Amino acid sequence: MLDTGLAGRTVWITGASGGIGRALARSFAREGARLVLSAHSQLAELEAFAARELAASAPLCLAVDVRDPRACEHAAEAAVARFGRLDHVVANAGRWPSEPRRLDQLDPARLADTVAINLLGAAHTLRAFMAALARTGPRAADDASPGGASAVAIGSTAGRFGERHHSDYALAKAGLVGLVLSLKNEIVALDPAARVNLIEPGWTATEMARPALQDDGAVTRVVRTMALRQLGRADDVAQAALWLCAPRLSPHVTGQTLTLAGGMEGRLLWNEDQVDAERARARTRGPHH
């Protein structure tokens, strides 16, 4: 088995009640990490999930509104009080407003809330994580236990390519790029081996995306900008975050953006005629080719 170096490490995952959050929790639990799982309004659901699937890990489950910096500070403090230190964080909490709105038609309250959850929420989370690291200091490194704290923020391809009628979400996710590029130079003052990275998922089959993908043509339209014509999975994001956090797997990776979007580009790669022709060729080839 590949040694990630995460066994016994404390990992805080925000937005842990959602599809990607649950996949993250399962992945880190399999590595023997000590889990701090937080959710905003779905704490009961999170606790039920933890009792059902993660009982052996005995995770600490907390109600945290990431828009509130004090709530994030309290969560980090609770993690240190329970486990002695906080080694890693995945700032995963976010919200995608499903109703399409042109910017001039966008309610300013929605704009402010989207930025508060997706951008400021990540900043508050990472700020609290760094404050905890400043209090405990870096983990001592040796052959048995590699040092190096790490943080991963979950962004979106909306921050790279934009997203029509969802400019509030694109704005918030784009801001994470500058945040990560700044923090990778700040966190090393607290831990010389600490790292900060960003993951940008594209369209991923989760509860949050389901309303936008319900009609028959939605998935077809989405994958026309992708080399791999398929949606991502929550596990894809979880495994990428695991790799970026793991001190034995990516100790020299920091300030990077990993895009998980099937080769998505900001242009149309597949028109309807090409899609129909490819389907016809697939039927001709049959299942064994």
Image: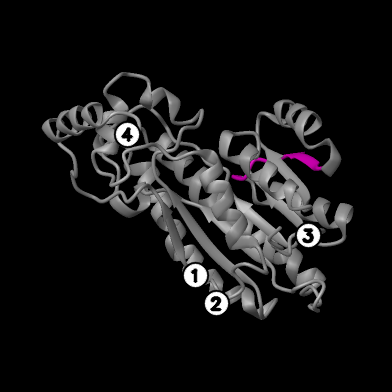
Badge 3: how crowded within 10 Å, few (<14), some, or many (20+)?
A: many
Quadrant of image for the N terminus: bottom right
Task: Calculate the distance from the C-alpha at mark 1 to the C-alpha at mark 2.
Answer: 8 Å
Three-letter amino acid code of the residue under disc 3: Arg
Q: Quadrant of residue 3?
A: bottom right
190 shown above or below 14: below
Marks 1 and 3, Cα distance to the nearest angstrom?
Answer: 22 Å
For numbered disc 4, what is the local secondary structure?
loop
Where does label 4 land, which residue? 106
Q: Is residue 15 visible?
A: no
Magenta region, residue range: 59-67
How busy is the neighbourhood of tag 4: few (under 14 within 10 Å), some, or many (20 plus)?
Answer: some
Earlier residue among tags 4 and 3 = 3
Whether label 1 touches label 2, CB < 8 Å: yes
Instruction: Report the side of 117 relative to 108 (left or right).
Output: right
Give the amino acid type for the residue marked by disc 4 in the picture: Leu
User: What secondary structure is found at the residue carrying circle 2?
Assistant: helix
Question: Which residue, given by chain and number where applicable, does mark 1 sit on?
Answer: 255
